[in-house]
Amino acid sequence: MCEKCDCNSAIDQLFENNEEWIKEMNAERPGFFSSLVAQQSPEYLWIGCSDSRVPANELVKMDPGTIFVHRNIANLVNSSDMNVLTVIQYAVEVLKVKHIIVNGHYGCGGVMAALQQSNPDLIDHWIRPIRKYYHHNRKELETIGEEQGEKAKVNRLCEINVVEQVRNIAHVPAVRHAWEKGQELAIHGFIYDIKDGRLHNMNVTIDNIEKAEKAVLRELC
């Protein structure tokens, strides 16, 4: 057994920070925690990157309980990922969210990894779809790289990745069923710039089956 080693100190710090946060919240907003006891009723599902620099609620200054959040490496929505599909179904059918937001960020490590060949096996498997997006847009991306540099190419691929996930969500069965029933539901694409904290609306929105079909044909997005 280790006695008060660095690992324990690091964990203890989290609990100390938690106590400080509780005190601050109770002082600033009496009744805050009791208000959270009620069942959450968020209007938004936020699908973002696992990157610790991209916190969902803080970016848009929203309280806990207002945004239902799912995060993974490079904010991907793969048809084989039961985790994200279950989250979407729960958000749409149980919570009745009105907006699904795919939030990417510039300089995404997962996107950069898709341009490399030396990734660990599972990571390489996970980011394989991004590599496909790169090949589909290779001419544009290589031109950007030649004219503006590698960073600009990666950032453009980050944007493309967000658009592709919006398209993917539009074909999740739970989303299609919601539209068929006339449920109000829209999918949006955002991207975050870590260097200045600004969130950008990519003006990519799908809110019905007709638009979803056009998106597949690249007539939309």
Image (spheres, helix red, strand yellow):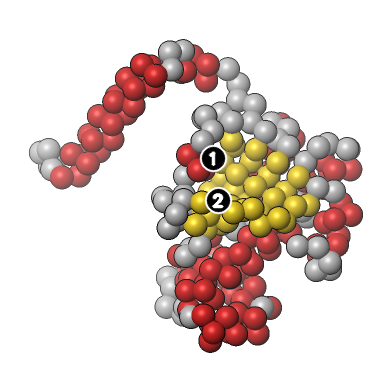
Q: Position of residue 211 (x, y in %)?
A: 85, 55
Q: Secondary structure at mark 1?
A: loop
Do tag 2 and tag 1 residues touch (Cβ < 8 Å)? yes
Residue at image x 56%, y 28%? Answer: 65
Image quadrant where one finds the N terminus: top left
Residue at image x 13%, y 43%? Answer: 5
Q: Residues within 10 Å of mark 2 (few under 14, many from 20)?
A: some
Residue annotated with mark 2: 199
Residue annotated with mark 1: 60
Query: Is 110 drawn above or below residue 9 in the view shown?
Result: below
Question: Residue 155 versus residue 121: which sits nearer the camera?
Answer: 155
Q: Is residue 84 left or right of residue 4?
A: right
**Mark 2: which amino acid?**
Leu
Query: Is 148 drawn above or below residue 19 in the view shown?
Result: below
Query: Is 46 drawn above or below residue 19 in the view shown?
Result: below
Q: Residues within 10 Å of mark 1 (few under 14, many from 20)?
A: few
